[in-house]
Amino acid sequence: MSAQAEPLRLALLGNPNCGKTALFNQLTGSRQKVANYAGVTVERKEGRLQSASGRSYAVLDLPGAYSLNPASLDEAITRDLCRGFYPGEPAPDLLVCVVDATNLRLHLRFVLEVRQMGRPMVVALNMSDAARRRGIGIDRAALERELGVPVVETVAVRHRGAQELVERIDQLAGHLRPPSLRLPDPADSDSDSDSGIGQALHEETRRLIAATVRMPARTARIDDALDRWLLHPLFGLLTLAAVMFLIFQAVYAWATPVMDAIEAATGALGEWVGARMGEGPLASLLVDGIIAGLGGVIVFLPQILILFAFILALEESGYLPRAAFLLDRMMARAGLSGRSFIPLLSSFACAIPGIMATRSIQDPRDRLATILVAPLMTCSARLPVYALLIGAFIPAREVWGGFNLQGLVLFGLYMAGILSALAVSWVMKKWRRDKGEHPLMLELPSYRVPHPRDLLIGLWERGMIFLKRVGGIIFALTVLLWVLLSFPAAPADATLPAIDYSLAGRIGHAMAAVFAPLGFNWQICIALIPGLAAREVAVSSLATVYALSAANDEAAAQALTPLISDGWSLATGLSLLVWFIYAPQCIATWAAIKRETGSWKTMSIAAGYLFVLAWLASLLTYQVAVRLGGG
C-alpha cells in the first residue's frame, strides 16, 4: 500500500468509558469531522491518521457498545458497521477493540464477541498505566496467544500514548488476515441465553482472566472508599443533590454574563446597521430578522457549553454512571431511567441542552420519553413572564410564619412542571406497546481525572453541532416571524400600534375565539405569537401591544404591572401563568426535538400534547378561579 492509495479504514469500538474517544482524539487530533449516520441522529466521527511510515488511515470512532446483541440504536449501528452491513458505509479493514485494562472482566467478554465476527482486529489495552498503579498484572504475551489477535498497550490521555498501536497497525497493514474462531457464531441461534453462547462467553472470559491476569488482593482502595460514600443510600443522594445544585447554579448563573454580552453585541450590531441603512423593509429584515435571529441562536451557546462541560467531566471522572445508578429505581416508577435525570435537570436552564443531553441515554424508548417531557421543566425563559404575572396578581406578603407568598407561588410553578413531567412519562409507559422494564445496564468505571484536551474537543464538537443543526431552523423561522410581525405595514392614519395591523395582529384577533374560554383577550393572543421565538419575548410583546415604549424587558414589566393588574382579572392572570407551564411556545425547542429524533411526527406530537395540556389546564384554572370570585 502506498501513501497515495486508498487509506486503510480503522474502526475503534469498545464499551462506554473505555477511553475509546480519547484514543480517537489521540490518533486523529484536529483532523476530524462529525456528521450523522445515514437515516439516524447518531453521531458519526471520522478522522485521519498519518503514521511515521507515511501510511494514511481513515479512523472511525464507532458508538459505544456493551454487546453486539444490540439493546440500543448505538449498538445496532456498531454491529452492522463492523459486519459491513450498514448502508452507505464500507466495512472497516481493521477493528481496534479498545478495553479498559483496569476492568478486563467486563471488557474481555466484548472482545470475544467481536472476535467471533472473524474480521482482522487488534486489542488495545487502554489505561494500562492505571492498571499497573493498582497492582493489576496483565501477561500481554499470554493474552495475545489465547485470543489469537495482536494485543498492545495504550494510554490515550498521554502524549504518544498510542505510538505502539500505530506501529502495530503499520506492521499489519500489508497482510491482514482474519483471526481463528474459538466459539460458535451467535447468528446460528435465536437467543444468546437459550443457546448457551452467553454462558460460553462468560466461561471463556473467566478462563482468560485466570490465565493472563493477576489481580491485587483487593481493588483500588480509593475507589472503594469513594463508593462507600457516593453510593450510600442516604449520603450518596445528598452528594448527588449537591452536585446537581452546582450544575443548576452554573448553567443558570455562570452563563448570564456571557449571554448578556452576546445580547448587547447583537443589539449594538443591529443599531450600527440600522443607523447606516436608515428606515425601510430591508433594514428591518437585517436588524429585526437576520441579526436578531442569529443573536437568538448564539445566545444559547454559553448554557450549552457549561452544561456539557459538567456532563463530560462527570462522565470522564466515572461519577455519572453512579448518579444514574442511584436514581434508576426512583425514575423507573415514572417510566424513565436513571440516565434521564441530568437531561431533565439541565432543562431547567433551557430545554434545548436538556434534549441534546439525552444522547447519553442508550435505550431508545427511555430517550424518546425524556425528550418528550423535557419541555415541561421550567426553563429560565419563563421567569420574566412569571415575574410579571406574579408581581401583578400575587400580593407580596408573608404567610405560614415568614414564607413569602410570591416565592411560594413561583416554587409551586416549578413543582407543577416536575410533577407534570413524571405524570406524562407514567402515562406514556402505560400506553406504549413495550410495557416491560428495561433494566439499566451500565459499568461503574474507576474514578479518574478528566483530561482537559478531551473536554475541549468534546465542547467544540457539541458547540458546532448546536450551531449548525439547530441554528438553521431557528434562523429561518425567526425571519418568518419577522414577516408576520412586519407586514402589512400600518396605514398612514394608524392610531394603534403597528403590530395591530400586521398578519400577526390579525391572527391574534382570530385566535381570541379559541382562547376566550381561558380568559385570554386578543392582546394576549398577539403576545403569544412572537413568544414562539422565545417565551420571554411575550413580555416585550405585551408592552408593544399596549403601546408602551421600554428599553428592555425589565422596564416593560415594571410599566406593564399596573396596567395588567387593573385591566385583567385575577382569573386571567392565573390562567396565563398555568399556560406557560405547559405551552410549547419555543421554536428552538421544536427544532431541537426534530433534529434529535429526526422525525417531524415526533415534533408534532410533542407540540400537540403540550398545547392540549396547556389549554385544558388553563381552562380549568380560569373556570375555577372565576367561580371562586377571581373573575
Image: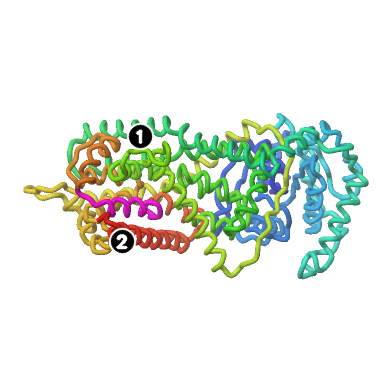
* Disc 2 element: helix
Direction from residue 147 to residue 448 in the image, left or right? left
Q: What crowding class fits label 2: few (fewer than 14 Cα within 10 Å), some (14-19), or many (20 or more)?
A: some
Residue 337: name its quadrant: bottom right
Let me know if residue 576 is in the magenta part: yes
Between 32 and 616, the one nearer to me in the picture: 616
- Label at residue 4: none
Direction from residue 93 to residue 570 in the image, left or right? left
Let me know if residue 102 is in the magenta part: no
- What main secondary structure does the magenta stretch of the protein show? helix
Where residue 106 appears, as percent x and y from the top left, is: 79, 49
Where does label 1 land, which residue?
263
Q: Are marks 1 and 2 in contact (CB under 8 Å)?
A: no
- The span picked out in magenta is 567-585
**Residue 283, can we see it?**
no
Seen in the picture, residue 622 relative to 390 is either above or below; the reply is below
**Residue 556, can we see it?**
yes
Mark positioned earlier in the residue sequence (1 or 2): 1
Q: CA distance from mark 1 to mark 2?
A: 40 Å
Where residue 184 appears, as percent x and y from the top left, is: 85, 64
Where residue 300 appears, as percent x and y from the top left, is: 43, 40
Q: Residue at x 37, y 41 (%)?
A: 406
Spot the residue most to the left. 493
Q: Residue at x 64, y 60 (%)?
A: 86
Which mark's residue is nearer the viewer, 1 or 2?
2
Where does label 2 land, which residue?
623
* Disc 1 element: helix
